[in-house]
Amino acid sequence: MTNQPPEKKLNRRKKLLIYKDIQIEMFKIIFWSNLLTVMVVSGAGFIFISTVRNLAIEADLAYIPRMFAMLSEFIWIYFVYLIIGVFFVFGLIFYAWLRISNMIAGPLYNIRRQLENYVRTGVFNKVVLRKKDKIQDFAELINESIQLSQKDKSDKVNKFT
């Protein structure tokens, strides 16, 4: 029997929400847009079913061809409402996704640009984000860690001089 080190197990995350403000905002947008889609489709279906029911109640055998003509015309109206509603909701989802992703991607781009500048020139400009940008705490942590590393470098240089 060989003495092997125990296999490392992946630690499970203990928190469900890591960045609560970002994740809750995304959940709200997805929830409300899905609810709006269901309401649009349900409303169009209700209009369709109530119209068919009213036509069936009022219809005599002599009016059946006229009823089918009206019904086929109404089906097109139903699909137009449905398509307009679905495209509206998809547009809303796309806008929300773009807005939220810009709140994350913008700061990440800014952080990356500052770090690349630091690696290239050795001069670090503090990462400054807009008020509504997400991951502010991450940017502050990067600023503090770079400042500490610069302070350590200057302390070592001063120690030898």
Image (spheres, rainbow, N blue to C red):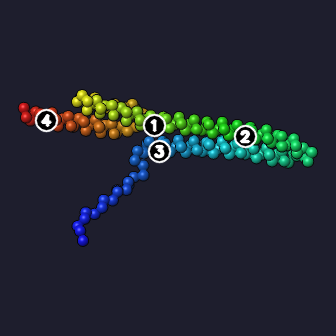
Query: How far apart in space, not on screen, are marks 1 and 2 (Cα)?
Result: 34 Å
Do the numbered discs 1 and 2 sit on residues whose CB atoms are within 8 Å?
A: no
Q: Specify whether 158 is left or right of 85.
A: left
Query: How far apart in space, not on screen, are marks 4 and 3 (Cα)?
Result: 44 Å
Q: Secondary structure at mark 2?
A: helix
Tell me which residue sits at (73%, 40%) in the image. Answer: 78
Residue positioned most to the bottom: 1
Which one is earlier in the sequence, the residue at label 2 or at label 3?
Answer: 3
Q: Which mark is residue 24?
A: 3
Q: Amino acid at mark 3?
A: Ile
Q: Which mark is residue 155?
A: 4
In which quadrant of the rendered view does residue 36 lie? top right
Do the numbered discs 2 and 4 sit on residues whose CB atoms are within 8 Å?
A: no
Which one is earlier in the sequence, the residue at label 4 or at label 3?
Answer: 3
Tell me which residue sits at (53%, 36%) in the image. Answer: 94
Q: Which mark is residue 101?
A: 1
Which one is earlier in the sequence, the residue at label 3 or at label 1?
Answer: 3
Q: Amino acid at mark 1?
A: Ser
Instruction: Classify 90 as above or below 61.
Output: above
Q: Amino acid at mark 4?
A: Asp
Which one is earlier in the sequence, the residue at label 1 or at label 4?
Answer: 1
Q: Specify whether 96 is left or right of 35.
A: left
Residue ID for mark 2: 78
